[in-house]
Image (tube, rainbow, N blue to C red):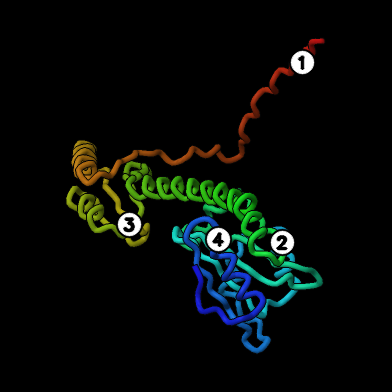
Amino acid sequence: MYDSTPDTGLGSFAAVLAGELPGAWTSTYHPDRGGTGDHHAVTDLVWDMNDVADALAKYSVDHCAVLRRDDGTRLFVADPLGHGEGYLIAAMAPQDLPADAFRGVREPDGITVAADPFSAAEDIHYGLLPRYDKALAQVRSNAARLAAAQAAEAELVVMTWSGDVLVVDKTERADIVKALTDHGFVFNPERDAFVLSGDDTAHQAASVRAAGERLSELGIGVVLRHPPARPALGTAPVAPPAPTVVSPHRGR
């Protein structure tokens, strides 16, 4: 799909390239702004740690173009940014996923293409886009796991023994606060936590059960924990016995 791109070399190339790529693509040209190189909003999203990233680190981007597919996939298009021919093409990272989801995922490194939009479209289709799709799938999988872990943590109340009292960390959720305070927990400013007294152990046990039932109705689990044991002063933990080492047997 074509747009009203000014008749510049890069802009025209990007517009034609958008029409040659499979799928529905649009091209947006970002013109030269008087040599300021102020295109960080675009270049900061380039998803590359190879040749394109190296070029961006060495040279200022005076103008560039962004190709966008109807599913949100975006490609960055720039001049060689140095002594070279053709154009640099790189994937752009999605902005709707958390930064932690990108950890451990190899970037879909960009490519240099000839100044021929028809051959460039083939290079992108068979080279860059498959790497992008693979990396994006991994990032989305990571994001889903992170969201699930956060949801599980958010839907769990941990009651920790401290002496003969139970302590629950402060929470901003009003429904959890009400479930706790309705069944005997009192907010302690010094601890910055909710505390259930152990003066009457039978009443304490009944309060824990009642609070747990109410939290369960809200879809929130409850865990009772004891603080980690500490070695007595003046003593050192006993080292575990050294494991027996068995010489490996190599067959021939």
Residue that carries the numbered disc 1 in the rendered image: 248
Element on which disc 1 rests: loop
Distance from Cα at disc 3 to Cα at disc 4:
34 Å
Image x and y of residue 3, in percent: 50, 75
Q: Residue at x 73, y 67 (%)?
A: 86
Q: Which residue is mark 2?
A: 112
Mark 1 / mark 3, whichever is N-terminal: 3
Q: Quadrant of residue 29?
A: bottom right
Labels 1, 2: front one? 2
Q: Nearer the viewer, mark 2 or mark 4?
A: 2
Q: Which residue is mark 3?
A: 171
Up/down of 105 relative to 60, above or below: above
| Nearest to N terminus: mark 1 or mark 2 | 2
Q: Residues within 10 Å of mark 2 (few under 14, many from 20)?
A: many
Which of the two discs, 2 and 3, labels the residue nearer the N terminus?
2
Cα distance between the residues tagged 1 and 2: 50 Å
Q: Label 1 crowding class (10 Å Cα cut-off): few <14, some 14-19, many 20+?
A: few
Comes first in the chain, label 3 or label 4? 4
Mark 4 vs mark 1, foreground winner is 4
Residue 55, picture quadrant: bottom right
At label 3, the amino acid type is Thr
Callout in the foreground (2, 3): 2
Look at 53% across and 70% down and name the residue there: 27
Instruction: Name the residue beneath numbered marker 4.
Output: 93
Point out residue 111 in the picture as x, y percentages from the top left corner. Answer: 69, 58
